[in-house]
Amino acid sequence: MPSPVQYSLKGKTGVITIDNPPVNALGHAVRAGLVAALDQGLADKQAQALVLVATGRTFPSGADVREFGKPPLAPILIEVIERFDNAAKPIVAAIHGTALGGGLELAMGCNYRVAVASARLGLPEIKLGLIPGAGGTQRLPRLLGPEAALAMILSGDPIPAAKAKENGLIDAVIDGDLEAGAIAFAESVAATRPLPRIRDREDRIKSADRALFPARRAELTKTAKHLAAPERAVAAVEMALDLPFEEGLKREREMFLALLETPQSKAARHQFFADREAARVPGIAADTPTRPVKSAAVLGAGTMGGGIAICFANAGIPVTILETDQAALDRGLAGIRKNYDGLVERGRMKPAERDARLARITGTLKYEDLAQADAVVEAVFEDLAVKKDVFRKLDAVARPGAILATNTSTLDVDDIASVTKRPGDVLGLHFFSPAPVMKLLEVVRGKATTPEVMASGMALGKALGKTAVPVGVCFGFVGNRIMLRYALEAELLLEEGALPQDVDRVLRDFGLPMGMFGMADLAGVDVFYFIRQHELKNRPQDAERMPQILDKIAQAKRYGQKTGAGFYRYEGRTPAPDPEIEALILEESKRLGITRRKIEDDEILRRCVAAMVNEGARVLEETIAYRPSDIDVIYIHGFGFPAWRGGPMFHADTVGLPKILADIEEFHKRFGARWKPSELLVKLVKEGKSFASLQGR
Ligand code: NAD
């Protein structure tokens, strides 16, 4: 196989070209090829300077993540970079696309960096629970000063070429052909001696203000208290000020390798792959043709309909919203305008942009106005009869080939599809509230949904900027079904002895942004109550008793933040424990004849987690979710599950399935049928397997 790195002489400049599609990842063959090409360039008497450039979409943007966790194959990147750094001829890195992670570290091992104006440069390792491990934390502070370097390393976000030129990360922005521009630049510096090397730069670190480090550490105790990598990043950059370069490089590598082994980094890498995997629908070929969506319609201009219309408008897709009467339509459109005005007021959107987006949204009361739409999303009341009526009318007017979607949370997509003459064109697009903000979209595959329509739903989700995850039909689909089970467990804990603030504190300590009850208050206790009523209708008669605390709070019209009281009392958005709720809970325990007991934090956590995992396993067993990683993606993007724990199923694997199953069996004995262990979970434990073993099925 030819090497993915080639050397050629162009005039007086040797050009090293990386050609490793699709993204020129720095895998083993590239690393070996870089060393060989460099040797060639250094040996080439004609070449006075060297240029390092990449073909295709981008300059290398990191290590090949598939090599993570495997024994490193020499030469490792840090050795390659050392070779470049020690070379006796000037080397110019010529950057287009993105230079990220190991790619930027390689570029910083060169004497000069030039880039096209559209290029972006960054060190995103922090997003994988890591710090740069090939000199990034030692070279970047020498180049930019510790403050700017740390900001880049801690955010992980890339900066555009213009900014990089301004702060000194690159030496020139190249207009026109990059390679030609880089060669011209190389010719202009070919005679410069001594060769400028970032490792020799001391000016920026000598003059640095050390107060930066305690200040950043103090911030991190608030913003990243659960995370190891940000603190290590601060320590590594601080090292650049204190240690000789070689020593700093060695210590950086040790820190990087230690982080690589942490569950946090493993979880972050799991999420990286899980997000990509979610885009694949089992049984549907990746090249299945999708139906283009150039115009859309939304039925219902309430909370969700308005939000979904905004999603279309934001994606540049004109959208018509249908309502039952003018007053409701006006209310809906006013809500949409208010949403955009809010963004403008907060300086997040220019007025002209708001106007352009608003211009894409039209209201109507007539079904005929939906006839041209390529995709229609229904978001009317959660009532089967209403939805069926709407779908019949829609079926009569929608153009052949239109994608017909329902945003139902609890109703049967197959049932809804059955009233149309084209159930194959019907699917669920389950947005989460607030729709313009929440990344998650469950794409619900009905019994009749054709592969083409399913693939189109996934593609539409992507076009709307969502993380689309395919799911099957059941009550609550994947996200809400699992959430309802653990919400129920949280409520049972209240009956037995805990208070909302106890449960919520434990869940927040675990890493969730809010506890269960804080979340219910935010989403609306009435919404949970409404869903529970639907759930009860779907339950077999002999199912376990349901707690009634939530019902009673909803019946008292304590709907949460929006009414100033729910499971907590609110001053603004700050929750405070409420004696009235405590009294209500104690009363419930009494009514049920339960002697309240002190429930340890450990039990609260084990019950909430085990409830989620057992339900998650059932969802897999029933193929409502296709892969454990899909559940993780849903929980991270839709329910604030801590990404550094990798999602509930990955977390279960990390804890160990035998331990989770032991918890479930214990609770099954103590609390009854609700805790029946999932057969899939039992099978996995018996076979000594993990959820991860089910990936790729
Ligand atoms: P909502 O009450 O805020 O809005 C419903 C709107 O539909 C109202 O404006 C109403 O006038 C309109 N409507 C009712 N019947 C209609 C008809 N026949 N034709 C046209 N319009 C009609 O409700 P919502 O919270 O926006 O929920 C809408 C749907 O989205 C429901 O199916 C719900 O389950 C689902 N959903 C809600 C959430 C959430 O958090 N609110 C999240 C995901 C999905």
Image: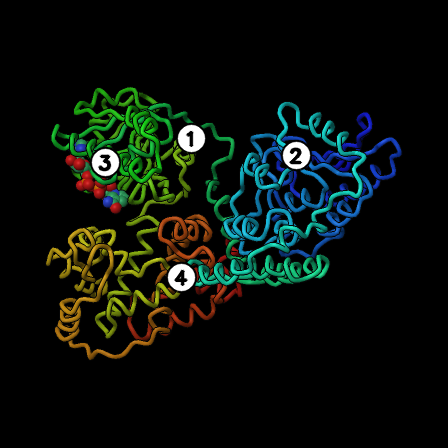
Report the residue marked by disc 2.
Answer: 114
Q: How is the image coloured?
A: rainbow
Q: Earlier in the sequence, mark 3 or mark 1?
A: 3
Q: Is residue 693 above or below residue 577?
A: above
Q: Are marks 3 and 4 in contact (CB under 8 Å)?
A: no
- Mark in front: 2 vs 3: 2
Q: Earlier in the sequence, mark 4 or mark 2?
A: 2
Residue shown at 18%/51% (left/top)?
562
Q: Which mark is residue 452?
A: 1
Ligand 1 has an atom within 8 Å of the beta carbon of the residue at disc 1 = no
Give coordinates of residue 271: x percent, y percent.
Answer: 49, 51
Residue shown at 64%/43% (left/top)?
103
Q: Quadrant of residue 545?
A: bottom left
Report the residue marked by disc 4.
Answer: 511
| Disc 1 residue type (three-letter) | Glu
Give coordinates of residue 362: x percent, y percent.
Answer: 24, 24
Q: Tag 1's secondary structure?
A: helix
